[in-house]
Image (cartoon, coloured by chain):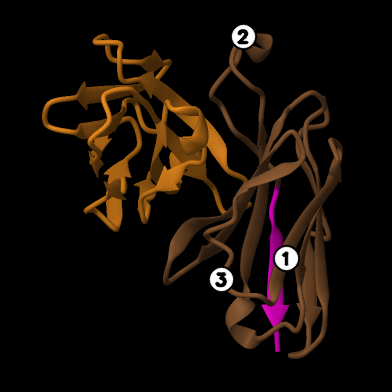
Chain colours: A brown, B orange
Amino acid sequence: DAGVIQSPRHEVTEMGQEVTLRCKPISGHDYLFWYRQTMMRGLELLIYFNNNVPIDDSGMPEDRFSAKMPNASFSTLKIQPSEPRDSAVYFCASRGGTGFNGRRNEQFFGPGTRLTVL
Amino acid sequence: AQTVTQSQPEMSVQEAETVTLSCTYDTSESDYYLFWYKQPPSRQMILVIRQEAYKQQNATENRFSVNFQKAAKSFSLKISDSQLGDAAMYFCAYRSAIPSGTALIFGKGTTLSVSS
């Protein structure tokens, strides 16, 4: 089990550029979450999917942010155009449904992507 | 809406000693889950311990144990025989048991330092 995979691990870009963060959840997990971590706001949920369908995107800060999950093994979080205040660590996490593998209710986190917008 | 509060931004402990990290939460739900996550400098989020609200018995995982007080909405983490590797930021988190409330709600975190 490779765990949740995120890429890139670090991203430095200039204001106004498009940024795409990628996530591969653990195989068989049907929930996928995107969180953002900043010093000021801590860890906050941006959006989550269940069976590839977005369920709650109320945490997405504004229209510059979009997330997709075209299939069960891949998700993207896109920021266009990026701004310096988007600098943060972005985590992807996945979770199995009830009764999955005897480890229900546990979210597994990826290593995070540290985004710096200059 | 549910909230999670960690009132200790920083804590310190000496090796081999015991330390307790505090967490309180607010909810009107009766069924939920509580978690403690550890985030070392590598920034990887690691699950330390989990508690189901319907269970009265406090969860334990080796040197880690919780004091779950449902009526007081308190969920503290005790680390016994502290080790240098325990130094990290610790997050308390809440998750509703209802299907639509499946995301984690985190506290602001407590930075734990361990000295030799």
A54 relative position to B69: left or right: right
Q: Which mark is residue A102?
A: 2
> Which chain is home to disc 2?
A
Residue B18 or A5: which is nearer the viewer? Answer: A5
Read off the magenta span. Answer: A111-118
Labelled pair 3, 1 in contact (Cβ < 8 Å): no
Discs 3/2, front: 3
Where B40 falls versus B10 (above or below)? above
Residue B89, image x, y percentages? 44, 50
Residue A48, image x, y percentages? 63, 46
Q: Which residue is mark 1?
A: A66
**Helix, strand or loop for disc 1:** strand
Q: CA distance from mark 3 to mark 1?
A: 10 Å
Q: CA distance from mark 1 to mark 2?
A: 33 Å
**Helix, strand or loop for disc 3:** loop
Residue A50, image x, y percentages? 68, 36
Residue A25 visible in this rendered orientation of the protein: yes
